Image (spheres, rainbow, N blue to C red):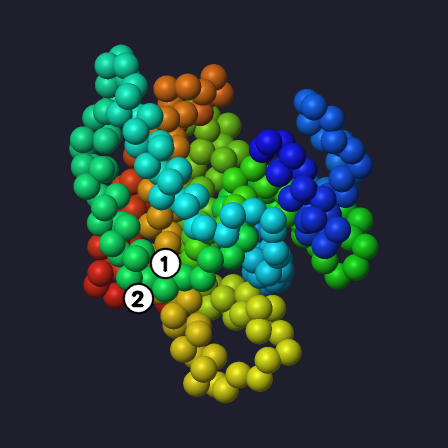
Amino acid sequence: DSLVLESVMFAILAERSLGPQLYGVFPEGRLEQYIPSRPLKTCELREPVLSAEIATKMARFHGMEMPFTKEPHWLFGTMDRYLKQIQDLPPVGLPQMNLLEMYSLKDEMGNLRKLLDSTPSPVVFCHNDIQEGNILLLSEPENTDRLMLVDFEYSSYNYRGFDIGNHFCEWVYDYTHEEWPFYKAQPADYPTRGQQLHFIRHYLAEVKKGETISQEEQRKLEEDLLVEANRYALASHFFWGLWSILQASMSTIEFGYLEYAQSRFQFYFQQKAQLSSSHPSS
């Protein structure tokens, strides 16, 4: 069933030139167009021209109508499931439980839910994982588009703020680091207010294409979206933090999952403290 839905999604995205062409589907997978390209590097996310195109692509993705449930259960539904699975781990997984207890994650998830319940964010079709590895830089662009989004395994209807906030968080993490823990975190690389506004303006330009908006309305849209994205960035830290605790107990991939989870939760509490005192820095 999920394979059928995934194939439908791929076909629709391909038709809109938002993903690779789909040539066929078979029980074990799909046959997709090969695209001469390379994934972006983390440091390229901050390049203004590329950042603008990522924003435009994200806005187009959000404009898609998909034949899936429009109820935004994905975010907290998945986090509830992850939390329960972590709690059900055998006692051998003690480091995982320590993280849960150290950060009081169950209670903290309630706090996050309250904060996001008071944060208006439209439900749109979200990619949910727009990080550099899932953005291809095309070797032979057919038009002015140089980028293509790929890897839609987490895509679903979700709150718009999550996709934007999650992307901002990815400016911080480089997963191509060749030594343990196989990622590098640079919290100082989180986009500044100016870099966020650059992204948000290009995002809104695509969403509001053809509409006439006063300067005052535009400013309000920008300010609201800044708050929305940075609050939902907390949800990104929480989501991938829980995901990483779970992966630590299951995955055979060589990666410092517990270190990564700890990094995400530390950044979560750090950003939460900043948000309660001010807007993002400029």
Q: Earlier in the sequence, mark 2 or mark 1?
A: 1
Q: Please state which of residues 85 and 99 is positioned toward the viewer in this rendering.
A: 85
Number of numbered markers: 2
- Residue visible at 22% across and 37% down in the picture: 106
Residue 234: horizontal and vertical position, in percent?
33, 50
Marks 2 and 1 sit apart, C-alpha to C-alpha, by: 9 Å
- Residue visible at 36% across and 43% down in the picture: 76
The tag on residue 14 is none
Q: Is residue 82 above or below residue 59?
A: above
Q: Please state which of residues 62 and 238 is positioned toward the viewer in this rendering.
A: 62
Q: Identify the amino acid type marked 2.
A: His
- Residue visible at 70% across and 48% down in the picture: 12
* Mark 2 crowd level (few <14, some 14–19, many ≥20, 10 Å Cα): few
* Mark 1 crowd level (few <14, some 14–19, many ≥20, 10 Å Cα): many
What secondary structure is marked by label 1?
helix
The image quadrant where one finds the C terminus is: bottom left
Q: Please state which of residues 174 and 233 is positioned toward the viewer in this rendering.
A: 233
What secondary structure is marked by label 2?
loop
For disc 1, the marked residue is 230
**Image quarter of residue 62:** bottom right
Q: Identify the amino acid type marked 1.
A: Asn
Report if residue 26 is visible in the image. yes
Report if residue 171 is visible in the image. no
Contact between labelled residues 1 and 2, with CB atoms less than 8 Å apart: yes
- Select label 2 or label 1 by which is in front: 1
The tag on residue 279 is 2
- Residue visible at 80% across and 36% down in the picture: 23
Q: Is residue 67 above or below residue 257?
A: below
